[in-house]
Image (tube, rainbow, N blue to C red):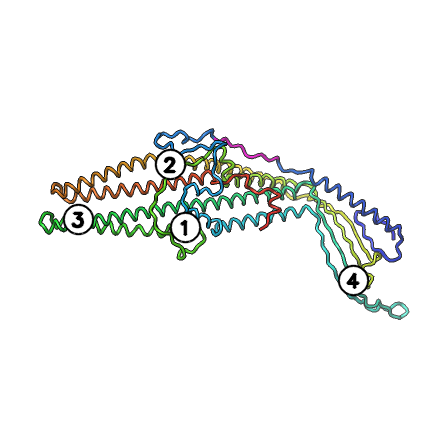
């Protein structure tokens, strides 16, 4: 059997092949080993993705609200210096509420939005492994057995001849490897890695959003409890006033009109107190859903709001780039889009595929494993697109435009983060001053009510003045409760705006993505 000089060589040995042929076969194997080794070297040397740099943004040196206009509100700020303790992990513990702590622990475990985000992360991580698998050869085997028989044939003398029935056994092993000379696979791996990191940041953002929403709902529910208690106290006071008015009417001091006014005020306030239960029930249901619990199986005992916003170490604007998971996710999206440009550019260059197959074939199962039954072939192929009517160029333009879009999204996310922090700082500053003012207003309304009641009992003023004073006092107390609820909500939103206790160093690396277990 003669040797071939073509790119693909196929050889089947028979028991009579000489040792020289075997030596040549080993030489060919050595040559191909060297070729594969050279391919391994080339794999790490070429990539057409642009060199990635994080898009430039210019954060302000300090937040606008760093210097509050009201000196009364300066105690709500604490700028985090490198030596200061910053928010870490369980940020809700800074509110020092044991029941809130217990509820927050359930969000990570049972919240279905968090579970869905975690599943998305697992899917993105699997895509990294799928892309990485393309860097290595593919091995396949297809053992088989076949039985065949040729028909009888008649020769020119009239006699017939035919091949006997033959059983053939095969134990092949096929290998193919597409060399990544131009970085298509490596850039795909990079893009998928960046996307997996983005989904990891999205997972943290989903978790942070759920935790912040639960904390906000919790403090609003406590504020609703405070309003319910306020109205219960008010209804009790109005009922006592009604009894006093009835006594004065029976003694001829007051008119029936005063009694009717007192009854109307009491009935109206009772109806308003009843309405407060709607929002409380809705907030309780919302908290249950955030915890992944059916509303009918969950309840929170009533307890009026009694908390004030803690000092939050919010840091400087430049730290937001590392502490906000949504910013980190947007930046990883930019990196992935940059890598996709390299994938698109690699399509301009040829694809080289190496292939090899070997194994054993025999008509006898007993001789299948004999060295003389071996078969093998090696080869290489090249594929190049000659004409595509501008398809590859359009694809590169598409990914460049996608990259520019992700850059714009990233910068907008950063700007929105600065805005949210400024908004919450402004809210806390203004609310702190407003709460003080409203507290003064409540004290004034209380004094006004005492005077009106005294003048009514002395017969100087009508009961209408008492009603006005009572309504004023109730309204001011209700406003104070709502302002305190707004304070707590703004404090929670500020923690969320600065990223909670997360930072970009917690994103999984490429090696961690490959080694992490579900």
Reading the image, the residue beneath label 2 is 428
Q: Earlier in the sequence, mark 4 or mark 2?
A: 4
Reading the image, the residue beneath label 1 is 287
Q: Nearer the viewer, residue 245 or 428?
A: 245
The percent coordinates of residue 37 (x first, y second) are 75, 42
What is the secondary structure assignment of the residue under circle 2? helix
What is the secondary structure assignment of the residue under circle 1? helix
Reading the image, the residue beneath label 4 is 169
Residue segment shown in magenta: 51-59
Identify the residue at horizontal 88%, vertical 67% (top origin). Answer: 155
Q: Could you tell me how far apart the alpha carbons at marks 4 and 2 are, in whole angstroms?
A: 82 Å
Q: Could you tell me how far apart the alpha carbons at marks 3 and 1 are, in whole angstroms?
A: 40 Å
Reading the image, the residue beneath label 3 is 261
The percent coordinates of residue 21 (x first, y second) are 87, 51
Q: Is 421 a magenta residue? A: no
What is the secondary structure assignment of the residue under circle 4? strand
Q: Could you tell me how far apart the alpha carbons at marks 4 and 1 are, in whole angstroms?
A: 67 Å
Q: Main secondary structure of the magenta part?
A: loop
CB atoms of marks 4 and 1 within 8 Å: no
């Amino acid at each position: 059997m003669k040797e071939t000089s073509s790119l693909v060589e196929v050889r089947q040995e028979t028991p009579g092949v000489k040792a020289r042929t075997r030596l040549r076969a080993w030489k060919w194997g050595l040559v191909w080993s060297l070729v594969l080794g050279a391919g391994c070297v080339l794999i790490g040397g070429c990539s057409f993705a642009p060199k990635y740099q994080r898009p430039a943004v210019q954060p302000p040196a300090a937040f606008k609200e760093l210097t509050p206009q009201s000196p009364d509100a300066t105690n709500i700020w604490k700028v985090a210096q490198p030596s200061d303790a910053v928010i870490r992990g369980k940020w809700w513990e800074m509110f020092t509420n044991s029941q809130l702590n217990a509820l927050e622990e359930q969000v990570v475990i049972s919240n279905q939005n968090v579970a869905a985000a975690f599943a998305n992360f697992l899917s993105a991580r699997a895509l990294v492994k799928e892309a990485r698998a393309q860097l290595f050869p593919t091995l396949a085997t297809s053992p088989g057995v076949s039985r065949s028989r040729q028909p009888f044939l008649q020769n020119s003398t009239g006699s017939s001849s035919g091949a006997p029935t033959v059983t053939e056994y095969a134990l092949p092993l096929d290998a193919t490897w597409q060399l990544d000379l131009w970085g298509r696979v490596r850039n795909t791996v990079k893009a998928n890695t960046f996307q997996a990191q983005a989904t990891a940041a999205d997972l943290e953002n989903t978790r942070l959003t759920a935790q912040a929403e639960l904390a906000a709902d919790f403090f609003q529910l406590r504020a609703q409890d405070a309003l319910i208690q306020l109205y219960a106290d008010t209804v009790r006071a109005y009922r006592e006033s009604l009894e006093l008015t009835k006594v004065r009417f029976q003694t001829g001091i007051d008119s029936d009109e005063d009694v009717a006014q007192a009854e109307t005020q009491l009935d109206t306030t009772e109806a308003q107190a009843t309405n407060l239960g709607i929002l409380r029930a809705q907030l309780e249901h919302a908290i249950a859903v955030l915890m992944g619990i059916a509303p009918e199986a969950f309840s929170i005992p009533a307890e009026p709001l009694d908390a004030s916003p803690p000092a939050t170490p919010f840091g400087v604007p430049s730290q937001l780039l590392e502490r906000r998971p949504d910013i980190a996710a947007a930046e990883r999206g930019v990196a992935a889009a940059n890598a996709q440009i390299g994938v698109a550019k690699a399509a301009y260059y040829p694809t080289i595929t190496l292939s090899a197959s070997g194994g054993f074939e025999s008509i006898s199962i007993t001789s299948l494993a004999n060295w003389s039954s071996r078969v093998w072939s090696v080869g290489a192929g090249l594929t190049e697109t000659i004409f595509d009517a501008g398809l590859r160029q359009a694809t590169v333009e598409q990914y460049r435009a996608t990259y520019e879009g992700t850059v714009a999204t990233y910068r907008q996310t950063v700007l929105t983060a600065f805005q949210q922090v400024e908004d919450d700082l402004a809210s806390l500053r203004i609310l702190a001053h407003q709460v003080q003012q409203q507290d003064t207003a409540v004290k004034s309304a209380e004094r006004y009510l005492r005077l009106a009641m005294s003048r009514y009992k002395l017969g100087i003023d009508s009961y209408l003045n008492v009603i006005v004073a009572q309504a004023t006092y109730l309204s001011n107390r209700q406003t104070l409760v709502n302002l305190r609820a707004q304070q707590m909500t703004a404090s929670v939103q500020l923690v969320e705006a600065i990223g909670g206790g997360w930072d970009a160093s917690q994103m999984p690396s490429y090696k961690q993505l490959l080694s992490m277990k579900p």
